[in-house]
């Protein structure tokens, strides 16, 4: 056997058979591919040579793992001699676009699939799910505007997740199909199958409930980001925390998971993105004050006013901050005023 034969045998021993399939399961092309060469480039070239052109960009998924540019198949655990299926998505980050919801309840999707708006339906909880699965270790960003609502959820779920329930409450994290951060009256909890999971910092130290006090209030607007790690944990960036908070979920690695969110707030807009939202950040020139305002019946509202610019004209923002019973209004406002005064003193 000469050196050329030995080289051919060596190259064959390092290859796999790759079946590139559409989301429907139809096989588009089949190609032999070395486990040690950049896989995405080779698969794009093969699709183009077979006459397949992307309207957006080609994204390749091996199970629930996104194969990134420059990665070889060996990096994602593929062994030589095997046959694998790689799903190709013709998309522009559709894992960060809403795709599934129930329009019959006056819900709608706009902004190119990035914004879900809940309809004005009483005694109803409405949810939304992304068009494509979320790859592991890929961060997405969510925002709730103008307010989150008394009951809201965000997290991940399977394609079997429900999209509505005919009562107010948490839509996700209550069964085996979803893992979610749940907001309720005076409560923040991470849930799966209805069971609450203790949140931790990156060192594994439990997060005290007192540290979540800010999140218990329906701040307006509010934004979050999270990813699901390869081990199934949820790493979240939350308002009031400088580093990620860890939820020790164990989301199965072989499961396709989608970003999900829900609210009971009529007119609430839930937006999703692959990058942080370009909202103004609080700085040394911001001036905050609390203005109590009377609402009829049993509730008072508290508004947070700021000189944060909302445009070239530098208009100020006036948004609802808290909805409080009269008996707790005085105590909460005093605490919040003291906190803001301390922050401004430090600045």
Image: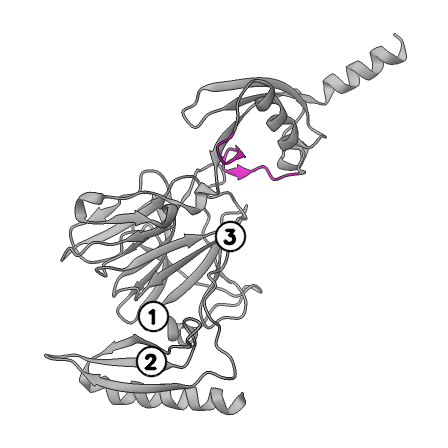
Q: Residue at x 50, y 92 (%)?
A: 345
Question: Is there a contact, CB below 8 Å, between mark 1 and mark 2?
Answer: yes
Q: Residue at x 58, y 23 (%)?
A: 48
Q: Which residues are the magenta region?
A: 54-69
Quadrant in the picture for residue 157: top left
Give 21 or 281, whichever is nearer the viewer.
281
Q: Give the CA distance from mark 1 to mark 3.
A: 22 Å
Q: Nearer the viewer, mark 1 or mark 3?
A: 1
Colouring rule applied to residues:
one colour
Residue 220: which disc? 1
Residue 117 location (% of width, % of height):
28, 54
Question: Is there a contact, CB below 8 Å, between mark 1 and mark 3?
Answer: no
Give 85 or 43, whichever is nearer the viewer.
43
Q: Say if 239 sits above or below 68 in the image.
A: below
Q: Earlier in the sequence, mark 1 or mark 3?
A: 3
Residue 304: which disc? 2
Give the position of the C terminus as an image quadrant.
bottom right
């Amino acid at each position: 056997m000469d050196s050329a034969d030995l080289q051919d045998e060596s190259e064959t021993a390092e290859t796999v058979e790759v079946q590139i399939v559409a989301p429907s399961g139809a096989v588009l092309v089949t190609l032999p591919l070395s486990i040690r060469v950049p896989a995405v480039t080779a698969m794009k070239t093969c699709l183009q040579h077979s006459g397949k052109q992307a309207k957006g960009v080609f994204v390749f998924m091996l199970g629930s793992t996104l194969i990134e540019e420059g990665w070889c198949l060996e990096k994602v655990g593929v062994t030589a001699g095997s046959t694998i299926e790689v799903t190709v998505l013709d998309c522009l980050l559709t894992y960060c676009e809403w795709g599934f919801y129930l329009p019959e309840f006056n819900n709608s999707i706009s902004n190119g699939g990035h914004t879900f708006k809940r309809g004005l339906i009483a005694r109803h909880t409405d949810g939304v799910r992304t068009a494509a699965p979320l790859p592991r270790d890929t961060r997405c960003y969510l925002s709730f505007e103008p307010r989150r609502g008394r009951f809201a959820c965000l997290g991940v779920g399977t394609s079997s997740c429900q999209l509505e329930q005919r009562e107010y409450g948490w839509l996700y994290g209550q069964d085996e199909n979803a893992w979610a951060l749940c907001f309720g009256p005076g409560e923040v909890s991470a849930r799966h199958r209805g069971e609450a999971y203790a949140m931790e910092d990156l060192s594994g130290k439990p997060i005290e409930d007192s540290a979540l006090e800010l999140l218990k209030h329906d701040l307006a607007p509010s934004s979050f980001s999270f990813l699901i790690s390869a081990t199934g944990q949820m790493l979240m960036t939350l308002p009031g925390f400088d580093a990620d908070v860890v939820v020790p979920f164990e989301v199965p690695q072989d499961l396709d998971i989608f970003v999900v969110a829900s609210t009971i707030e009529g007119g609430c807009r839930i937006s999703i993105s692959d990058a942080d939202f370009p909202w103004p950040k609080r700085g040394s020139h911001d001036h905050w004050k609390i203005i109590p305002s009377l609402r009829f019946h049993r509730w008072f509202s508290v508004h947070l006013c700021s000189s944060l610019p909302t445009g070239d004209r530098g208009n100020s923002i006036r948004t609802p901050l808290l909805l409080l019973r009269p008996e707790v209004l005085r105590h909460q406002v005093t605490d919040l005023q003291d906190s803001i005064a301390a922050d401004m003193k430090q600045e």
